[in-house]
Image (cartoon, rainbow, N blue to C red):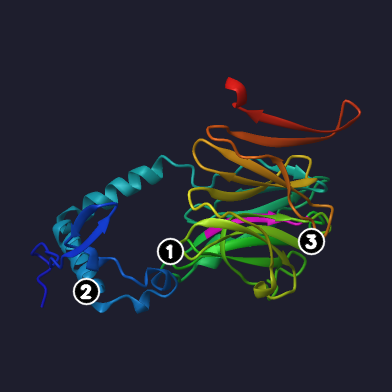
Amino acid sequence: MIDEHEAPRADKRPVTTTRHGVTLTDDYAWLKAPNWQTVMRDPSVLDPTIRAYLEAENAHTDAALADTRALQDTLFAEMKGRIKEDDASVPQPDGDYAYFLRYREGGEHPLICRTPRAGGPEQLMLDGDALGAGKAFFRLGPTSHAPDHRRLAWSYDDAGSELYVACVRDLASGADLADRVPDVAGGMVWTADATAFYYVRLDAQHRPTRVFRHRVGTDAADDVLIYESQDPGYFVSIGEVQSLHFAEISIHDHESSESWLLDLRVPDARPTLVAPREKSMLYNVEHHPAYAGGPSLFILTNADDA
């Protein structure tokens, strides 16, 4: 039986590896579960020995800090007292509506809302507090309303694994459709006809490397792969340009980047490269549909010592 008041000590189980002629010994390699990808999705499959040690660490921490619990509550209350609990974002106008998120006093999760720009009551599209009620963990991820304002793509993580599931809500009925898209990273970008959206999916190593297109009403297993990065050192993300004509796929690390554009007005669009990646060159793209008489791209970059 483990004594929670005694600091736990992990067993030393040396594992020796050689890389590039250098031999390393790790006494605690056994604490990294070889099936960690599966554990992220189902914590119950974690090796019982690893779980027992982690629980012993947690129990020791709780015991060691037990006499500070009243102080913790006081500090937490003081921090909350300095926060505007019912805060809201600046409304973003789009078509007939202005979209924003807000918090209710005493709540923990955002409420995704809109108001008619011509006047009228607030419409609550998504209630994060209600979605998270009764769950040991819940985090609402990015949301994106469709161009026709009839649907909302939204995502959530209820396991703490940072593996988000994307759903589609019908805003007239308030009900979610059958669509469930797993392993989503970041936001979703709708096509102009509101029948599909693009998103980034995590790979087996938990890296955002691939862009897919999900057609509403279809199985996520049938989603179409649009782009895949073969370089594990780069991250992939997707977002909308301000004209809403294109989605920008960005492939980047901290010093180099590359952009591809997807025409959102073309149902089965394929990405078009803006400029090939160069070492230590960063750039991002904006689109103006009618600049100086014709469509133009504006590129912000550090190329040529800019």
Q: Position of residue 58 (x, y in %)?
A: 22, 64
**Mark 2 Cα shell of 10 Å, populated few (<14), some (14-19), many (≥20):** few
Residue 29 colored in magenta in the image: no
Let me know if residue 306 appears in the view: no
Q: Which of marks 1 and 2 is nearer the N terminus?
A: 2
What residue appears at the point 28 percent right and 48 percent down from the top-left corner?
A: 74
Q: Is 10 on the left-hand or right-hand side of 129?
A: left
Q: Where is residue 221 in the image (x, y as percent from the top left)?
A: 65, 74
- Majority secondary structure in the magenta region: strand
Q: Position of residue 227 (x, y in %)?
A: 66, 56
Dot 3 amino acid type = Arg
User: CA gap, disc 1 to disc 2?
Assistant: 19 Å
Q: Quadrant of the C terminus?
A: top right
Q: Name the residue under label 1.
A: 160
| Residue found at the very far right of the displayed protein | 293
Residue at disc 2, secondary structure? helix
Looking at the picture, tell me which residue is in the foreground, 161 or 298: 298
Q: Give the range drawn in magenta.
A: 140-146
CB atoms at circles 3 and 1 under 8 Å apart? Answer: no
Looking at the picture, tell me which residue is in the foreground, 130 or 74: 130
Dot 1 amino acid type = Gly
Q: Name the residue under label 2.
A: 52
What residue appears at the point 63 percent right and 29 percent down from the top-left corner?
A: 301
The relative height of residue 258 versus residue 214 in the rendered view (above or below) is above
| Residue 150's disc number | 3
Residue at disc 1, secondary structure? loop
Q: Position of residue 232 (x, y in %)?
A: 49, 53
Which tag is nearer the camera, tag 3 or tag 1? 1
